[in-house]
Image (tube, rainbow, N blue to C red):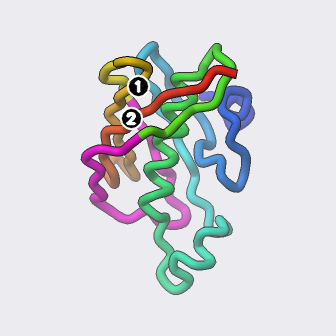
Amino acid sequence: MKGAEYVKSIIPHRPPFLLVDGVIEEGEDNIKAFRDIRPEDPVFQGHFPDYPIYPGVLIVEGLAQAAGVLLLNGKKGVPLFLGIEKARFRGEVKPGDRLHYEVKILQKRRGVIFADCVAMVNNKKVCTATLMLGFKEA
């Protein structure tokens, strides 16, 4: 397993918007990563103070960042989030949860990468989506 310093060595995101805490496994066209959802995360001050739920948009951004780690590994550049297809939210993510990201590259076409993405908590899917990604070389 590789931690946050490894992630920061690849993608340009930084706290509080770095949403990948570590990488569990990497292959040529897939990655498994995670984010520990902390009760002190600033998002919970407003979403929602009496019933804290990690926002779906941040789950999708975390999947995109995990994909960025996969796509930029060994390259210098900025990952680009180009689109979302078929996003579905299937469960709540709460403070104290470990959010697992699984990203698999489906195809690359004209500089656009399509990835099948799943986010899970306790082996239960909380989000599925197909993301369109790219990167700008530095």
Figure quadrant of the N terminus: top right
Q: Which residue is mark 1?
A: 112
The residue located at (27%, 54%) in the rendering is: 88
Q: Nearer the viewer, residue 55 or 75?
A: 75
Instruction: Say which label, 1 or 2, has the lower sequence index.
Output: 1
Give the magenta-colored segment's residue range.
Answer: 83-103
Q: Are marks 1 and 2 in contact (CB under 8 Å)?
A: yes
* On screen, residue 51 above or below 19: below
Q: Amino acid at mark 1?
A: Val
The residue sitting at the front extreme is 110
| Label at residue 132 | 2
Figure quadrant of the C terminus: top right
The magenta stretch spans residue 15: no
| Label at residue 67 | none
The residue sitting at the bottom extreme is 50
Percent across and percent down for residue 20 are: 59, 43
Q: Quadrant of residue 92?
A: bottom left
Percent across and percent down for residue 72 are: 59, 22
Percent across and percent down for residue 87 are: 30, 50
| Left or right for 129, reference 29 | left
